[in-house]
Image: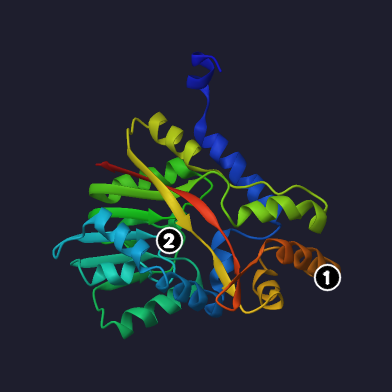
Amino acid sequence: MKEMDYKTIDWNEVWKGLYEKNVGSRGRGECATIWDSKKKAEEFLAQSDKNPERISRVIERLRPGPGSKVLDIGAGPGTLAVPIAGLAGQVTAVEPAAGMAEVMKEYAARQGISNLTVVRKRWEDIDPATDLDGPYDIVFASHSLGMPDIRKAIEKMTAVASRQIFLFWFGGVTSWERPMVDLWPKLHGKAYTPGPKADILFNVLWSMGITPNMSSGELDHAKIYPDVTSAIGDLREQFAISTPEQDEVLRHYLEEVMIPKNGQLALPGKTTGVQFWWEV
């Protein structure tokens, strides 16, 4: 690509286009709608608890101090917000999904956390003047950038940050998107388009005059099931399955890729994670 062509690309529009194609190919609402179910949110928290090293690595990167104010955007069930609240002065968690927000509040109560505020809104709908108590020393979004206008989202983060911003996102097709790319034509008669990734995000940041620090690493997203039938039950919503014929397509795929592990079956999954961070 010629240098001039590269400079004239509107990377935010590239992000928007891939985001919209992804939502359209999934045939359902935005990312947060998946997690309105409290049961799904509890399962997500339980799965995260099995990988405490990942949580520790993120907290070590953020380095929250006793007097620091932290903003967690897309906090999920409090995987990071709750333990960070145990280290920081104040944490605000923005989480739109009902199930996730409810599980996070219960998790915080179990841990005796009282300095965590949960805001039930999408980041796009947040009014910093009325919804937040900024500025925040640390603003971060951990794998929660399912936002159509990423430039506007980052501008809002910058407006409420006083020290550092951290963004954690995916580099390349994720382990859960790969089978969707493979199976979508068989299940739904059309292609599946993955969402925008870290390469687009970097270019959006660069176009905004932000030169972020970067690092990357491998994330393990393996899922364990007692049998194939249990896996189908868990994955049916993800693959938008509604017929016995679609069940059989997924069953055949899982029988080929799942591997025995400690008397159960593992659905392996490796994904590249990319971290961006910069001083405000």
The answer, for residue 146, to whether it is visible in the render is: no
Measure the alpha-carbon separation of dots 2 and 1.
32 Å
Mark positioned earlier in the residue sequence (2 or 1): 2
Please determine whether, in this image, residue 110 is positioned above or below residue 47. below
Instruction: Judge left or right: residue 233 versus residue 157.
Output: right
Instruction: Judge left or right: residue 247 versus residue 270.
Output: right
- Give the image's coloring scheme: rainbow
Q: Quadrant of residue 56?
A: bottom left
What residue would you read off at disc 1? 243
What residue would you read off at disc 2? 74
Instruction: Judge left or right: residue 53 versus residue 203.
Output: left
For label 1, the SS is loop
Q: In which quarter of the image is residue 66?
A: bottom left
Between 110 and 159, the one lying in front of the other is 110
For the C terminus, give its image quadrant.
Answer: top left
Q: How crowded is mark 1: few (under 14 residues within 10 Å), some or many (20 or more)?
A: few
For the image shown, how many numbered marks are present on the structure?
2
Residue sitting at x 49%, y 78% = 42
Q: What residue type is labelled 2?
A: Gly
For label 2, the SS is loop
Q: Where is residue 224 in the image (x, y as percent from the top left)?
A: 57, 72
The answer, for residue 178, to whether it is visible in the render is: yes
Q: Which mark is residue 222?
A: none
The label nearer to you, 2 versus 1, is 1
Q: Quadrant of residue 225?
A: bottom right
Q: What residue type is labelled 1?
A: Thr
Residue extending farthest left: 67
